[in-house]
């Protein structure tokens, strides 16, 4: 009965999402269509006035909003010190949450919310949000494949290299085009590669053919076996998350929760949220990154690698 109900709900959700995506007057029919439809279905893009504006440049405020929606972030930080944001701006809350997430830092007391975001800036933000280079030595030689690698700013190289190394960005005709603005369609495609599934309700099993984002409390990851990235999103507020007998050969990224008991084997556990304790008496963890103010219980069977 549960399987039948789940199937009905999935079919209903898929139908509703397709209808919603079709409502956009300018939804393209090309390489970006499926990614844009997924972004709409998962609440990342809402469009404006019945238009999805796929070819428009994405602004920094728009990207901040998508990052907040993707992770289900609600924690805010005071951004009144930035001189180019006002409390009545439509993006103020999203920017406050994106800064709290560590996605944006700004410079010279400005967040430049209305500016288009370049490809290298967008890739750096994604690297931060998903901890792609956290606690790891990034081989920047992967950038040698691009004819315009010298155009990548020094401050962006590690972030760009980390997202290229994971296969989320491949460039075009041998160019990475770091200084070009990224369009909404291009960004939707990258996000679709980064996170394929968004889990908004507790469930008994999970897809293993794409990275997953957990945005609901009460999700049980025990016995999960996958070679894809699993992200515990900012939306998760459970005090205790217990994982038993998991086999994760990619990263477990912790952006939500308070106490993570991680039983099983892990290639990497990356904790990006302050105030989290990670423990597990019989863990086999190759690499751990812990952000400041979080704790890794060293009584676990730590196999080595980076620890902070």
Image (cartoon, rainbow, N blue to C red):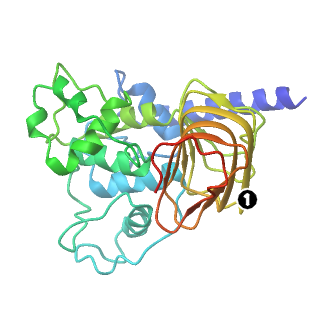
- Answer left or right for 89 relative to 286: left
Q: Residue furthest bottom?
A: 81
Is 66 in front, or is 227? 227
Residue sitting at 49 percent across and 48 percent down?
70
Residue sitting at 29 percent across and 80 percent down?
81
Is 289 in front, or is 44? 289
Residue neighbourhood size for the residue with mark 1, other residues' Cα within 10 Å, grouped as few (<14), some (14–19), many (≥20): some
Question: Residue 134, image x and y in percent?
Answer: 40, 49
- Answer left or right for 153 relative to 61: left
Q: Which residue is mark 1?
A: 240
- Answer left or right for 154 relative to 51: left
Considering the numbered disc 1 on the image, is that residue within a helix, a strand or a loop?
strand
Tell me which corner region of the image, top left, top right, bottom left or bottom right, holds residue 57: top left
Residue sitting at 34 percent across and 53 percent down?
62
- Answer left or right for 170 relative to 304: left
Image quarter where the N terminus lies is top right
């Amino acid at each position: 009965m549960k399987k039948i109900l789940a199937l009905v709900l999935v079919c209903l959700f898929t139908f509703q999402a397709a209808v919603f995506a079709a409502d956009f007057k300018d939804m393209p029919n090309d390489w970006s269509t499926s990614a844009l439809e997924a972004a709409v279905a998962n609440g990342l893009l809402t469009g404006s006035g019945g238009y999805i504006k796929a070819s428009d440049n994405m602004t920094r405020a728009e990207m901040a909003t998508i990052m907040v929606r993707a992770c289900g972030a609600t924690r805010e930080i005071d951004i009144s010190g930035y001189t180019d944001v006002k409390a009545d701006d439509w993006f103020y809350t999203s920017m406050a949450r994106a800064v709290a997430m560590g996605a944006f830092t700004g410079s010279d007391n400005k967040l430049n919310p209305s500016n288009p975001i370049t490809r290298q800036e967008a890739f750096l933000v994604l690297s931060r949000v998903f901890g792609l280079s956290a606690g790891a030595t990034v081989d920047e030689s992967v950038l040698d494949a691009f004819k315009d690698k010298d155009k990548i700013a020094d401050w962006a190289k590690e972030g760009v290299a980390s997202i290229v190394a994971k296969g989320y960005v491949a460039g075009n005709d041998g160019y990475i085009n770091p200084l070009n603005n990224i369009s909404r369609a291009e960004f939707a495609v990258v996000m679709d590669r980064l996170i394929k599934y968004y889990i908004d309700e507790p469930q008994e099993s999970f897809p293993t053919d794409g990275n997953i984002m957990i945005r609901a409390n009460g999700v049980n990851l025990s016995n999960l076996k996958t070679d894809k990235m699993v992200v515990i999103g900012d939306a998760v507020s459970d005090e205790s998350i217990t994982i038993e007998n998991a086999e994760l050969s990619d990263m477990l990224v912790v952006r939500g929760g308070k106490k993570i008991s991680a039983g099983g084997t892990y290639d990497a556990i990356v904790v990006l949220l302050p105030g989290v304790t990670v423990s597990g008496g019989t863990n086999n963890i190759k690499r751990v990154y812990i952000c400041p103010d979080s704790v890794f219980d060293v009584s676990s069977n730590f196999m080595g690698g980076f620890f902070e």
